[in-house]
Amino acid sequence: MAFLIRVLLLAGIGWLLYRAYIRWQTTQNQHRGAPPPEKFEPMSRCTGCGLYLPSQSLSPSQRCGSCEQKR
Ligand SMILES: [Zn+2]
């Protein structure tokens, strides 16, 4: 009878480990499959025409492309 209890105990431990492994794998996949967080782009106003544009598209003097060409 003690042998049967030991077998059941080992089976239970194995099942718990299996469940933990599956859960760990799914969380790993979720982390890998998750899309990267959307980047927030700060908006800046062109000093030439007053147009709001992403600050990356403005020149160092805070002017848009067309205003830079006009100068
Ligand atoms: Zn402009």
Image: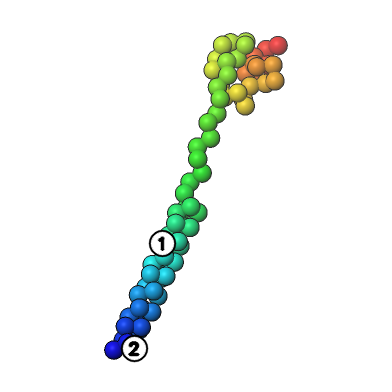
Numbered marks: total: 2
Residue located beneath label 1 in the image: 23
Note whether residue 69 is visible: no
Residue 48 placement (x, y as % from top left): 62, 10
Residue 37 placement (x, y as % from top left): 50, 40
The three-letter amino acid code for the residue at tag 2 is: Phe
Residue sitting nearer the eye, 20 or 54: 20
Note whether residue 5 is visible: yes
Could you say which quadrant of the image residue 24 lies in? bottom left
Between the residue at mark 2 and the residue at mark 1, the CA separation in whole angstroms equals 30 Å
Q: Residue furthest left?
A: 1
Horizontal side, residue 15 vs residue 66: left or right: left
User: Callout 1 environment at 10 Å: few (<14), some (14 to 19), or many (20+)?
Assistant: few
The structure's colour scheme is rainbow
Residue located beneath label 2 in the image: 3
Dot 1 falls on a residue whose secondary structure is helix
Q: Quadrant of the C terminus?
A: top right
Closer to the observer: label 2 or label 1? 2
Question: Label 1 CB, ligand 1: below 8 Å?
Answer: no
Give above or below for 64 relative to 21. Answer: above
User: Callout 2 environment at 10 Å: few (<14), some (14 to 19), or many (20+)?
Assistant: few
The residue at the point 63 percent across, 21 percent down is 58
Residue 43 placement (x, y as % from top left): 55, 22
The residue at the point 50 percent across, 54 percent down is 32
Could you say which quadrant of the image residue 11 lies in? bottom left
The residue at the point 54 percent across, 17 percent down is 52
Give above or below for 55 relative to 4. Answer: above
